[in-house]
Amino acid sequence: MNSTAFSNIARFIALWAAQVLIFNNIDLFSFINPFPYILFIILYPTNGNRALLLVAGFLLGLSVDMFENSGGIHAAASLSLAFVRPSILKFSFGISYQYHNLNILRKVTSDVFKSMEVFTYLALSVIIHHVVLFILEFFRFNFIWEILLRTLLTTIATLLTCILIIYLIKPAKK
Amino acid sequence: MQQIFNFFIKNSTKLLFLLLLIISFALILRTHTFHQSSFISSANGVTGYVYENVNSIKEYIHLKPENDALALENAELKEVVFNQLTAQDSLEMNRFKPTVDEEVFSVIVAKIIRNTFKTKENYLTIKGGEKQGIESDMGVINSKGIIGIIEKTSKNYATVQSILNVESRINAKIKGSNHFGTLQWNGENTGYVQLTDVPRLADLHKGDTIVTGGISKIFPEDIPIGIIEKAFTTESSNYFTIEVRLFNDMTNLGYVYVLKNNYIEEILDLEEKTHNE
């Protein structure tokens, strides 16, 4: 097992544990919980196996669902994010990201405060995930304003938490 | 044949995505239509164990208010016991009491290890399951009032459908009268539930107490729920919609009592026979 695979598995477990044990209990204003577990999908290597990402995202969402009693909403939302990720990458970093052999982990952690590209990538990923999540959670269209409000506020909370986590795991400057 | 294989190989990622999406939608539909699948719920062994440990930390923080509540409840129960003793000593009422050979409801105490109140369909997880004799469709209350109904059970844990769940329907009435209604939640405020289908003739006032009704197999009569905050009706409707302020703060719960109806099988059996005829 090489080091990339190992660090991905470690990230999967660490983010899942943090989500279930800490972030699901935050209840800011009694209804906002950030969902930073999607960082796993965001930071997955760009040249990695796509099918594996789909399966891993699905399992991650499903294991969060188990603890939230929410059926399969996190699984469906994470799966959708994993599926559209190449398009988000193309949109944020330009069409040629594949040829530059972009190291997404290093790029995101080192440039999170400097580059607009990284911020666009993070924000788009979070928004897509949360829109799918909250539409499925409410499952009724008479709550449309509440869906929008929850999506907006939770997106802000998740973005802040993600940036905080990225800042914490950032490698020290040499 | 070759083309079919090529198609599958070319679109393998998309097909995988669709397959997993269908699985997750099936899981969502299951939770929205009927009882949850027991694997993907917090009543299973792994999730129960994790929540139990997380909860022990929370429990430590809330130790003092929880103790106060228990002491208060003890005092109330003592009062009931003492008053009963004196009444029986001076008057021989025992002859006129209806004889009950077995108690109708037995009470099982359980601890809440997980409480949700931020979605439209809220569930609680309690420590206590089939081992303790807890089964589906038992009532759950605490000292202040009603909490919900048992949904799923496993060996050591159970989930409770909270009254703060838009799917929840509970029979309730105004204390002292026999006007029944259905208690449900509109999904907005965690401190209020709605009592609907109360006939317009009912004599009700702001501040009246709402209790559980007598026609339920799950709850005994007169378990407190809340008080009337406001009642309104439209010209064309024959029924009141009543806004009920809950006695319980549903966001802050500790220990609960699970009510087991000892005659439930007899009642269900009888009802089934009646339907079959």
Image (cartoon, helix red, strand yellow):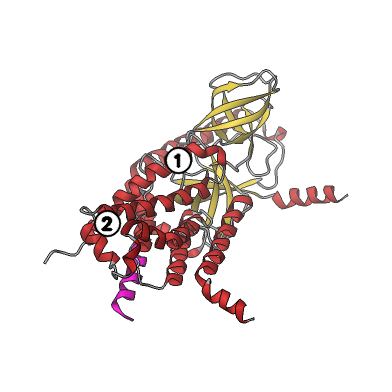
Extent of the magenta region: A1-15
Question: Does residue B78 appear anywhere in the picture?
Answer: no
Q: Position of residue B228 (x, y in %)?
A: 55, 25
Labels 1 & 2 near each other (Cβ < 8 A) = no
Q: Is residue A114 magenta?
A: no
> Given the image, on which type of amino acid does mark 1 rest?
Leu
How would you rate the neighbour count of disc 2 (Cα within 10 Å): few for under 14, some for 14-19, many for 20 or more? some
Dominant secondary structure (helix, strand or loop) of the stretch shown in magenta = helix
Q: Quadrant of the N terminus of chain A?
A: bottom left
Between B154 and A49, the residue placed more toward the observer is A49
Is residue A37 rendered to the left or right of residue B187? left
Q: Which mark is residue A148?
A: 1
For label 2, the residue is A165
Q: Position of residue B211 (x, y in %)?
A: 59, 32
Residue A60 occupies which quadrant of the picture?
Answer: bottom left
- Position of residue A91 relative to residue B253, above or below, is below
Mark 2: secondary structure: helix
